[in-house]
């Protein structure tokens, strides 16, 4: 078992920041704005983010360069920098890689995790909370250890999940909750950690199969897939992403799930197992995002058209 480096008791004098996507940028900027000495930023390597061949840096790398902070993709640099200050702390926000034992033994690490641990350990806690219909979620500031998201928790905040929350909106709310908690842990110390207790669930990465709509399920469950982002179905043999929708109460007697219940120039309602789902914003295969009116104008649907085929 790895012997973890001890956390600074009364706050850290230097910070090594680990992060990659846009959601982590605010944490980096907050630490700097409050005078925390961020000596190094570690982020994932540049990747191709569009159709072109050029590689582009991560949002965290861009932010760090604007702040004139040294950036690296190599964990070897972490160990070199950590030797310079015994009161260094590592702050991890959506870094995207597992940190090896050799680093954890030398640099004490805390991590921002967007769930109420031990529920939804793993890669996709926000998405899984929405798909499961959880009434609440939260954020935990936890110790980074060898095992996935099993470290003791130093701070925890809860919020309710709104019926209209999407992955993006909920993640933003959780980010708002966590910024002050991280900054306080760095400046004043983490305090006494609490071991995780309760039912353990793992938030596996979202796969295409998680987002393909089964019209034999409830309208509520299908709308959860839409709120996560990337939900899709097939109609007339073509893939259709459903980006926004709403539940409508209707009598779907005589209509099988996936069948169109209502179709006009401005409305398209699909039968589910228990109700109907009215489409609002869509993205047809190979085309741009459009409102349902624009899609209906060229979709050539009728009351016998069936989604899911």
Image (cartoon, rainbow, N blue to C red):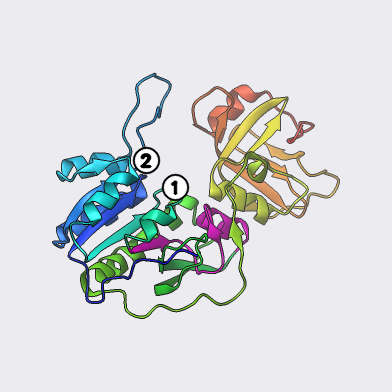
**Residue 44: which disc?**
2
Relative vertical location of residue 148 with respect to residue 65 in this rendering, above or below: below
- Above or below for 211 versus 104: above
In the image, is residue 245 part of the stretch drawn in magenta? no
Image location (x, y in percent) of residue 80: 24, 50
Q: Where does residue 265 sit, x and y in percent of width and height?
A: 61, 31
Identify the residue shown where x is 35% and y is 26%.
55
Rendered residue at 59%/25% (across/down)? 285
Residue visible at 65% across and 29% down in the picture? 239
Q: Say which label, 1 or 2, has the lower sequence index.
A: 2
Q: Spatial distance from mark 1 to mark 2, Cα to Cα?
A: 8 Å
Q: Residue at the spot x=52%, y=52% of the render?
A: 123
Q: Is residue 22 above or below residue 50?
A: below
Tag of residue 5: none
Does 125 appear in magenta? yes
Residue 152 is drawn in which quadrant?
Answer: bottom left
| CB-based contact (under 8 Å), mark 1 and mark 2 | yes
Q: Secondary structure at mark 1?
A: loop
Nearest the viewer among 279 and 48 is 48
Residue range (magenta): 108-133
Image location of residue 29, percent across then percent down = 22, 53
* 172 and 187: which is toward the camera: 187
298 and 81: which is toward the camera: 81
- Residue at disc 2, secondary structure: loop
State the residue position of label 1. Answer: 97
Kindly indicate the quadrant of the structure image that contains residue 197.
Answer: bottom right
């Amino acid at each position: 078992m790895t012997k973890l480096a001890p956390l600074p008791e009364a706050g850290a004098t230097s910070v090594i920041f680990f992060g990659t996507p846009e959601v982590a940028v605010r944490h980096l900027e907050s630490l700097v704005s409050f005078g925390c000495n961020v000596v190094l930023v570690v982020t994932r390597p540049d990747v191709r983010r569009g159709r072109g061949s050029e590689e582009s840096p991560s949002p965290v790398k861009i932010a760090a360069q604007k702040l004139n902070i040294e950036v690296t993709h190599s964990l070897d640099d972490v160990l070199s920098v950590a030797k310079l200050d015994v009161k260094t702390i590592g702050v991890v926000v959506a870094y995207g890689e597992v940190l090896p034992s050799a680093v954890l033994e030398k640099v004490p690490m805390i991590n921002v995790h967007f769930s109420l641990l031990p529920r939804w350990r793993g890669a996709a806690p926000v998405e899984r909370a929405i798909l499961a219909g959880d009434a609440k979620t939260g954020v935990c500031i936890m110790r980074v250890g060898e095992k996935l998201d099993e470290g003791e928790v130093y701070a925890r905040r809860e919020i309710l999940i709104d019926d209209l929350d999407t992955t993006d909106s909920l993640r933003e709310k959780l980010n708002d909750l966590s910024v002050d908690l991280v900054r306080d842990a760095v400046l004043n110390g983490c305090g006494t950690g609490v071991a995780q207790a309760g039912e353990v669930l793992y938030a596996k990465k979202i796969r295409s199969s998680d987002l393909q709509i089964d019209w034999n399920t409830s309208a509520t469950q299908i709308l959860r897939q839409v709120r996560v982002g990337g939900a899709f179905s097939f109609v007339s043999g073509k893939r259709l992403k459903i980006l926004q929708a709403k539940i409508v109460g209707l009598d779907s007697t005589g209509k099988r799930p996936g069948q169109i219940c209502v179709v006009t120039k401005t409305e398209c309602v699909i039968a589910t197992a228990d109700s109907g789902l009215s489409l609002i914003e869509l993205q047809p295969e190979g085309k741009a995002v459009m409102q349902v009116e624009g899609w209906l104008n060229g979709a050539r649907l009728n009351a016998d058209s069936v989604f899911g085929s």
